[in-house]
Image (spheres, grey):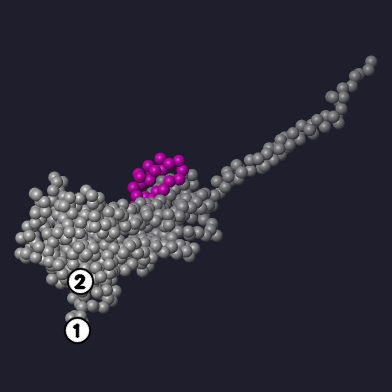
Amino acid sequence: MFKRSSPFIYDVKNRMKICGLLCLIAPLAIALRLFYMQTFQHDKFTTKAERAIYNYLAEDRLRGKILDVNGNFLAQSVRTHSCGISKRYVKDRNKTISFLAKTLGIPKERILEKWRRNRNFFFVAKKIKPDVYMQIVPTLRTSLGQGLDLTPEYERIHPYGETAIDLLGASNSKNYGLSGIEQMYNRELSQDISKKRAKRARRGEVIYDRNLKEHRSVGDVYLTIDLQAQFFAEEALKKSVEEYGAEHGIALVQEPSTGKILAAASYPVKDGQSLGFQFTYEPGSTFKTIAISSALDAGTVTVTDSIDMDGRKWEVARGFTIRDNQHDKDFLSIPEIMQLSSNIGAGKIAVDLGAKNLFYYLKAFGFGTKTDINFNGEAKGNVPPYNKWTKVDLATKGYGYGISLTPIQLINAYSAIANGGTLMQPHLVDRIEYADGRVDKKSKPVKIRRVIKPETAKIMTKVLQSVVEAGSGKRAQIKGYTVAGKTGTAEKLSKEGGYGKRNHIVSFCGFVPASNPQFTILVVLDNPSKYTFGGTAAAPAFKQIAENLLTLKGIAPDQVDFIN
């Protein structure tokens, strides 16, 4: 009897081959899996690895500076730090929180509340003080400091406090301009928030790359504002507003030959709210300068003419009479009309000029149109179409009623008279200097148009000079210097309708020295609680600003009698 052999069971070689194949399956599967992971899932696992080692931390970039025309810093950013916690790296929660509460001066309960609300990382305090930062730094390398993070940031500061803050405006913690120059030139001043890759050490400390260099693409904005002139304007304006209890005050200083704004003050101060560009009002008697200049230029009146005062009571139309109570003369010359601020005289001159001609000159002087100084919220005022004017409308416009304007429009018009008759484009920004060396010049003198003839401007300057020497502007006199200017006292429309003496605006606008004007200055006080006049409240403020500027810039006296 023969036994049958089974090659499957008894063939040792076959059995070894099968076992070998079975043993290769696992390594082969692992190799294939590794190949798949390294080839097709490389990016996925690289990202996971980087997350374990690196952190991408958002960091504010340096914001550009805002400076005055001479390079004095008005707004700049300084480096500071914010303190945060990465919960997963903290070894002893209670000790770490107690340390931070004591060092940062924050209640422990507030930190614990943030701990409970956040899954991992959260900020405990933003923009900590330098001395606090120095207390935390040594702790980072101890067990107590594991998980603590000091993130560098930038904080906006104003070296001169609230000086020019109404112009500068504000920016937020995200490096974005909210108002004023900060908002208007946000694109030039700011960079995007950068994300820096940093290693996370075993204890949770952040290690920045030493070779990482910050690229600056921002610009520094240089204003036409002169810091000293701004200080003088703010000081004089604050004094006047508080002395007369005005609701608001405005003071502007302009260089008449170039249109540059050297100072723009508002009081009370609010960041980004510069009333010199945003406030509209009926100017009253300071507007007589514009109406009479227009008539002189058009030839409808000459400086030697005498105007009949109609017994100081002129009935313009039935039911509307203009009265002059400040003098007892039957006839007034042009200089006398300005010196005594005669409404009858200015009204009659406007009527003789005619609606169409007066409208033409008002538009030529820039009224009813934005100046394109481009400050946020700039108003354009209002000059109604001349074909809708009645004789009363025409007469009242001669002395500054029935038209609304902005302070920047009025001072720019006076500067046109001061420089010989040319309306200049006003400028608030002088230049922008970029980190790469580029310079964008913004304040090149731009002549918009000739408004009046040079001889008209010369005559009007003499007339305005007489107002200060012998008329309502005597308190604007400056020893050794000739001053040309005009006072204004305008009643405001009340809520009930009509004009009332309880609500009024007083102002003074002029230029100095009259023989070679260097500064045009406007002071406006809105609704002073004490009833006063432009000559008694605004003219002294003009004088204070002008005296300081003349001394600061070393302008030589031009008054012949004084020199001799």
Q: Among all residues in the image, which is located at the extreme top?
A: 1
The residue beneath circle 1 is 564
Q: Is residue 110 magenta?
A: yes
Q: Is residue 23 above or below residue 431?
A: above
**Badge 2 density bin: few <14, some 14–19, many ≥20, Cα 10 Å:** some
Q: Secondary structure at mark 2?
A: helix
Is 445 drawn above or below residue 202 in the view shown?
Answer: below
The region drawn magenta spans 99-125
Left or right: residue 554 versus residue 398 is right
**Mark 1 residue type:** Asn
Which tag is nearer the camera, tag 1 or tag 2? 2
Which residue carries the number 2 mark? 462
In reply to whether residue 138 is colored magenta, the answer given is no
Disc nearer the start of the sequence (1/2): 2
Position of the N terminus, as image quadrant, is top right
- What is the CA distance from the residue labelled 1 to the residue labelled 2? 21 Å
* Residue 179 visible in the snapshot: yes
Dot 1 crowding, Cα within 10 Å, few <14, some 14–19, many 20+? few
Give percent across and percent down for residue 337: 13, 65
Q: Quadrant of residue 552?
A: bottom left
Instruction: Please tell me which residue lies in front, 26 or 178.
Output: 178
Tell me which residue sits at (9%, 56%) in the image. 314
Q: Which percent across, then down, holds residue 90?
A: 47, 47
Numbered circle sitting on residue 276: none
Q: Give the residue type that dot 2 points to.
A: Lys
Depth check: give the residue in front, 502 or 247: 502
Q: Residue at x 16, y 50 (%)?
A: 493
Identify the image quadrant of the C terminus. bottom left
Residue 78, can we see it? no
Determine the residue located farthest toward the bottom in the rendered image: 564
**Residue drawn at x 42%, y 57% as measured from the top left:** 189
